[in-house]
Image (spheres, rainbow, N blue to C red):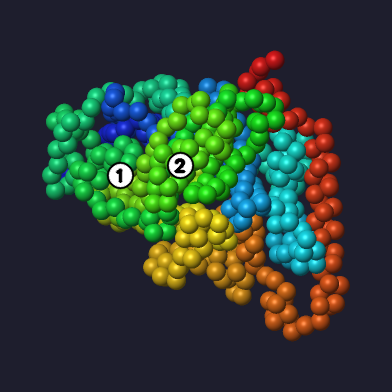
Amino acid sequence: MQHGPFKLMEKIIIVGGGTAGWMTAATLVKCFPSKKICLIESPNIATIGVGESTLGQFRGWQATVGIKDKDFMAACDATYKLSIKFTDFYDKGESFHYPFGNPYIGGNAAGLNEWWFKKMIYPETPYSDYADCNSPQMTLVNENKCFLNHKRNLNSFTFHEDTAFQFDATKFGLWLRDHVCIPAGMKHIKEEIKTIEQDENGITSLNKKYKADLFIDCTGFKSLLLGQALKEPFIDMSSILPNNSAWSTHIPYTNKPKQLVGYTHCTAVDNGWIWNIPLWSRMGSGYVYSDKFISDDDALKEFQKYIGTKELNFKKIKFKTGLHQRIWVKNVCAIGLAAGFIEPLESNGLHSVHEFLHQLVRTLGRGPVSHWDRDTFNHMCKNYFYAFMEFVALHYALSHRQDTAYWRAHFNKEWTSDFFSLVPKTYHGFLSAIHERGFRYKFSNFKAGLHYIAAGMHWGPTDMPSLIKENIKPDPYHWKTHLQDAGPRLDRRKAYWKKVIKDVPSTYDFLKDNIYGEV
């Protein structure tokens, strides 16, 4: 007979709906069809509903749940996402892309460093050219086109692996409820949680009647179970990530075929940054900022001036950056905002949901959950969260903007203590951006995206002083002769990719013909 918390988790209650709650429910009913899954949500609480963009890893979760693009896209106002564009982050007047998927380095003498040799020989080359030369899907992004490439060779680009989605997150959660969760037989209860009963092993019941082996907290920033009931400490990370506020709105199209692009656009402004996410029927936009540098009212005015209108519905959101010290405590596990949040940059809200769910599924699949299982779950999720937090922070740390107090604060921030105090580190954390065997950053995982962000921010893995030092060849003529073919070779590759997609449809036409069936 099993005692205490170390028992099979056969009955699971998810508290909270929204995207996180229904993604959790869909994952569990798919992976554990014999378990009793129940979702309880308040009939009176609206979801945050601004997370409208995903990263490439969403494809892995999609495969886990077993849903195809055409199953949900039309119902969720969805479009395809091939990249993230960053404008004015390094300095005003510059932009660059972070395309998804593996870069193509076939024929390169020096891997991804090849482009930096081109830059040395042709210093007028814009930094945005880095992604254009290394990512074949940038040809699609630049031409605003989209296609299924099973009959065309676009080198390393594979459509169903190297694309993500932009969608209405609220509609997506409801779609999962109605088409995945409820049909699988899971129980759905709309009821306010008024009492939470506990003992030494965790939560015993909700409202004195709902009992389970495991309670999953999907109650958003409220963190009703983990934060409020179990009082798990919250690790504030606002010293690393300054933003804590956002205004969001929906913008109608004025020229849909042109404005509907295959990427999310992030533009740095005076006191933060503004996102633009093109969905099928409208665009989602929001201003992320710090109320330490600008008031909410002034931020709204700045946002309205940027988009050119006041005649829209604007929603204010306050958030806190950080993570609970433990995500799984006793018989409570938090997923989504209830566990922690970084900020909207790099679409990490939904990203942490499906990555934490992957670890949860692996843990539950072992059988009874021991302290080891919970501790390793917490360690892996915390490791992943910290690494992604550092990746997001690098977008500010590498900036050279000094035109406002907000950006000067980033430019003048002292980082030394953070390099050593934030553990554990992984390949896209601060330490990896600093050095790797003489280089400034490493490429142990191409899909990490660090090399695209670093290139766009002028942070290169090598340069002429490094080549001279490492090879003891100080003659500039030697290097010009030795490296001069790098540029033309990469440019020929770009020309080939452009030729491959010459007659493929626009992003708008592709979605119209393949997903929405509109004339």
Along the polypeptide, which appears first: circle 1 or circle 2? 2
- Residue toward you, 4 or 25: 25
Q: Residues within 10 Å of mark 1 (few under 14, many from 20)?
A: many
Residue that label 2 marks: 299
Q: Looking at the rendering, in which quadrant would you find the N terminus?
A: top left
Quarter occupied by residue 120: bottom right
Tell me the element at label 1: strand
- Left or right of residue 496: residue 98: left
**335 relative to 423, above or below:** above
Tell me the element at label 2: helix
Residue that label 1 marks: 333
- Left or right of residue 214: residue 340: right
Q: Position of residue 214 (x, y in %)?
A: 26, 40
Amino acid at dot 1: Cys
Q: Where is residue 445 in the image (x, y as percent from the top left)?
A: 58, 58
**360 relative to 183, above or below:** below
- Residue toward you, 379 or 507: 507
Identified at 45% across, 30% down, the residue is 314
Identified at 46% across, 37% down, the residue is 300
